[in-house]
Image (cartoon, rainbow, N blue to C red):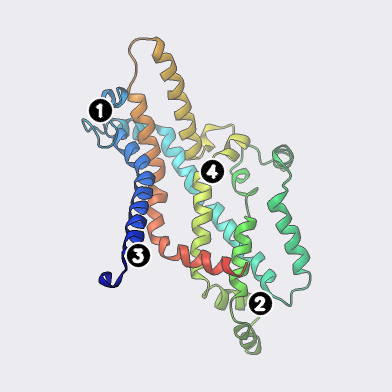
Amino acid sequence: MLKKLSIGDRIFYAIDYMFIALVICITLYPFVYILSCSISNPAAVAVGKVWLLPKGITFDAYRRVIEDRLVWISYKNTLWYVSVGTTINMLLTTITAYPLSRKRFSGRNPIMMFISFTMFFSGGMVPTYLLVKNLGLINSRWAIVIPVAISTWNLIIMRTFFEGIPESLYEAATIDGCNDIGILLKIYLSLSKPVMAVMVLFYAVSHWNSYFNAMLYLNKEELYPLQMLLRKILIQYEQSDLMADVMEGRDAVGQTIRYATIIISSLPIISVYPFLQKYFVKGVMIGAIKG
């Protein structure tokens, strides 16, 4: 097939491959650099000898991070926020998207218009904080998952996917005596595995990376998610670095601990992504084309 390509096509493909390779290198380099620094000798990292491959491999930074009790507490908290939050997200998004996808559902256009309105105009940070406070959710796990129970963008994608399911299936199930709950559970959900997998990935990653709501609504360290603890560690060692510039005995281990914490906090979500990646393009495209 390559012999049939013209010289212009070959030049185009060569440039295309070089560009893709460049993008891959730019994308992967930060992760490789952080991984190399996390397992390198702290002294080599401090003087800038590590730029790609690790120097003087040691796992002391990982040992120190693992021995920190707060890391495991925040890990447990993050797993709770991801599992409970994603379950609430999927439940509410599904039972909202289904009726809005039915053309016979009266008032669906005005309701959809109001829902879409929230994408462009929100209540703002202060009113949202006062609402959460008046609901008694401050310093509560529910303050992290309830305010973000439904993503408007994800709701639109799922509603559009449901609209693409043939109407004849709905009519056949109705003739057989199936109600809307049965149609949703037995037909729509069974045909919606790609978009469901993508929604789970979107919501789970969002919860895993979230720290801003925790910064606003949580004051107790035992409720902190992992990303909030990571932010605290980064700020703590940034300040210690500033002090070390004017004091002798610089603690270079602090830098490798920061990198080790970043790797530990990223590994779980990176491990899950390959299993959902095959649904990723299909689910998003099918849900977005008709939007």
Report the mark closest to the observer, 2 or 3.
Answer: 3
Callouts 1 and 3 close, C-beta under 8 Å: no
As measured in the structure, the alpha-carbon distance from the residue carrying label 2 to the one carrying label 4 is: 35 Å
Give the percent coordinates (x, y) of residue 163.
63, 74
As measured in the structure, the alpha-carbon distance from the residue carrying label 1 to the one carrying label 4 is: 31 Å
Given the image, on which type of amino acid does mark 3 rest? Answer: Asp
Given the image, on which type of amino acid does mark 4 rest? Answer: Ser
As measured in the structure, the alpha-carbon distance from the residue carrying label 4 to the one carrying label 3 is: 45 Å
Q: Is residue 142 left or right of residue 74?
A: right
Residue at x-position 52% and y-position 55%: 202
N-term mark: 2 or 3? 3
Q: Which residue is mark 2?
A: 180
**Few, some or many C-alpha atoms within 10 Å of disc 3 (few <14, some 14-19, many ≥20)?**
few
Front in this rendered view, residue 197 or 37 = 37
Callouts 4 and 3 close, C-beta under 8 Å: no
**Residue 209, visible in the rendered structure:** yes
Name the secondary structure under disc 1: loop
Q: Which residue is mark 3?
A: 9
**Residue 81, visible in the rendered structure:** no
Q: Which residue is mark 4?
A: 210
Q: Which residue is mark 1?
A: 41
Name the secondary structure under disc 4: loop
Report the mark closest to the observer, 1 or 4.
Answer: 1
N-term mark: 1 or 4? 1
As measured in the structure, the alpha-carbon distance from the residue carrying label 2 to the one carrying label 3 is: 53 Å
Q: Is residue 146 above or below residue 106?
A: above
Report the mark closest to the observer, 1 or 2.
Answer: 1
Residue 108 picture quarter:
bottom right
Name the secondary structure under disc 2: helix
Q: Is residue 254 left or right of residue 74?
A: left
Front in this rendered view, residue 38 or 172 = 38
N-term mark: 2 or 4? 2
